Image (cartoon, grey):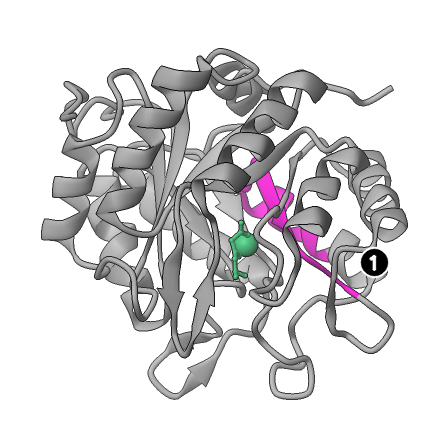
Amino acid sequence: MTGDIKPSSNTGKATLITVAPTGAESEKSRVPALPVTLEELVTTAKECREAGAAVIHVHIRDDAARPTLDLGRLTDTVQALRGATDLIVQLSTGGAVTDSFERRLAVLDARPDACSLTCGTVNFGDDVFMNPWGFMTELYAKTQDLGVVPEFELFDFGHIAALHRLLAELGEPFGGHVHCDLVMGVPGGMPGDAATLVAAVAALPSGATWSATGIGRTALPVLFAALAAGGHLRVGMEDTVTFARGRAVASNAELVERAAAASELAQRPPMSPAEARDMLGVPDHRG
Ligand code: KMH
Ligand code: ZN
């Protein structure tokens, strides 16, 4: 199962920065800076593009700021983000832990550039984030049919084994390139530390590129470990709402700015969306 990708294989290359601005877990009433309306999301997207992001990982909310997978809203969101920025628009197919498989599959009908695809079930705090094999394969086949580029979300080592099986049984993804995101530090998933990151990267499929994100207080250790190991970065208020001890995140843009500054220090400056499309095999559907 162990791939031959080297932890340093991206060294010297630009850094892909993905912003995950909203998520499904934080409440607007507790986190006022969270972008929940379409207008707030578009403003956030423009600021984050300016700060160095190339991909936006999108969860949306309803009029009461609750997570929703309403197809009309998702379609409008894809169009609005495409109209306002050149970011790669990646819709979440994870949704909230309460969302049905049917609604999660239907997300692709909003025709995003890309989508998340989680490679297994994981304990998720007090909840369970369900991704059984049958759902994974149906979702993957639908990405291939509709021409949506999947990003493989890996919360634990078993997910890496499931990714190998998925590729072996269903073939390569649309776009021809495998890109993974290590989601670390979820209570119930793999820990967010350097040793775990290096071990996970060593197990990825040969030729895959990868990003990493650390949830909560693992955000910075994972960010620095990912840069040191030659990986790419995901940051945003989906994953952390604390900028430093005792100081709330003021905006998604400041998280992207911090990631971009760290990338510059590592001499791997942020990648443009056009460069990211080339690396990930994502067509440009704008006009
Ligand atoms: N909200 C989590 C239950 C994804 O976007 O694909 C799932 C999640 C993963 O955020
Ligand atoms: Zn998500």
| Spot occupied by residue 75 in the image (x, y as percentages of width and height) | 85, 42
| Spot occupied by residue 231 in the image (x, y as percentages of width and height) | 29, 35
Quadrant housing residue 167: top left
Give the residue at mark 1: 38
Is residue 37 in view from this perspective?
yes
Residue stretch in magenta: 44-61
Total marks shown come to: 1
Is residue 46 in view from this perspective?
no
Quarter that holds the N terminus: top left
**272 and 191: which one is in front?**
191
- Eyeballing the image, is 2 above or below 260? above
**266 and 283: which one is in front?**
283
| Spot occupied by residue 229 in the image (x, y as percentages of width and height) | 18, 37
Residue at 66% x, 57% y: name it.
100
**71 and 90: which one is in front?**
71
Q: Which amino acid does label 1 sit on?
A: Leu
Question: Is 46 colored magenta in this rendering?
Answer: yes
Residue at 17% x, 22% y: name it.
3
Residue at 50% x, 21% y: name it.
280
- Eyeballing the image, is 80 above or below 96? above
With 22 as the anchor, is 60 left or right in this view? right
The kind of secondary structure element at disc 1 is helix
With 156 as the anchor, is 106 left or right in this view? right
Question: Is 268 colored magenta in this rendering?
Answer: no
- Eyeballing the image, is 133 above or below 191? above
With 157 as the anchor, is 215 left or right in this view? right
Q: Determine the quadrant in which ligand 2 lies.
A: bottom right
| Spot occupied by residue 4 in the image (x, y as percentages of width and height) | 14, 18
Q: Circle 1: is it few (<14), some (14-19), or many (20+) Cα within 10 Å?
A: some
Quarter that holds the C terminus: top right
